[in-house]
Amino acid sequence: MHQQTIFIGSLNASIVHPREVFKEAFRRSAASIVCAHNHPSGDPAPSKEDIDVTRRLVECGKMIGIEVLDHLIIGDKKYVSLKEKGYM
């Protein structure tokens, strides 16, 4: 298992590209990944952009054979699993 920071966003935005997310997974011959990011506001509720990025990552992962197991959003002492919420 490995942990890697891929992007560091600003206070309210981050640009996520699947190419960069999966690059490290390829290097490590990973069969699956879990994505996670924080919401500095403390509210872990997923935004429309969070949901869109997650769906794009899942689609890309299926094409290349690397499963996205979950995408976690971390807030102030709580988190949201996009898998548990049915967005994946």
Image: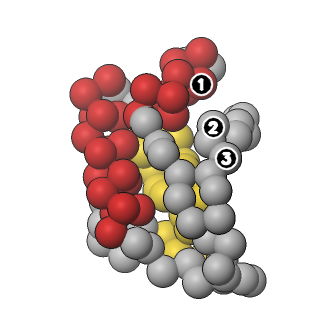
State the residue in front, 59 or 84. 59
Q: Amino acid at mark 1?
A: Glu
Which of the marked residues, 1 or 3, is nearer the chain's N terminus? 3
> Judging from the image, what secondary structure is the residue with disc 3 in?
loop
Q: Residue at x 40, y 72 (%)?
A: 47
Q: Which mark is residue 67?
A: none
Residue 50 higher or lower than 59, as above or below = below
> Judging from the image, what secondary structure is the residue with disc 1 in?
helix
- Whether tag 2 and tag 1 are in contact, CB under 8 A, the answer is yes
- CA gap between label 1 and label 3 equals 16 Å
Position of residue 74 measured from the top left corner of the image (x, y, whole percent): 64, 71
- CA gap between label 3 and label 2 equals 7 Å
**Where does the C terminus fall, quadrant-wise?**
bottom left
Position of residue 20 measured from the top left corner of the image (x, y, whole percent): 51, 28
- CA gap between label 2 and label 1 equals 9 Å
Position of residue 82 measured from the top left corner of the image (x, y, whole percent): 42, 67
Q: Residue at x 62, y 71 (%)?
A: 39
Q: Dot 1: few (<14), some (14–19), or many (≥20) neighbours within 10 Å?
A: some
Q: Which mark is residue 8?
A: 3
Q: Amino acid at mark 2?
A: Ile
The residue beneath circle 1 is 24
State the residue in front, 80 or 5. 5
Circle nearer the viewer, 1 or 3: 3
Which of the marked residues, 2 or 1, is nearer the chain's N terminus? 2
Q: Residue at x 47, y 43 (%)?
A: 16
The residue beneath circle 2 is 6
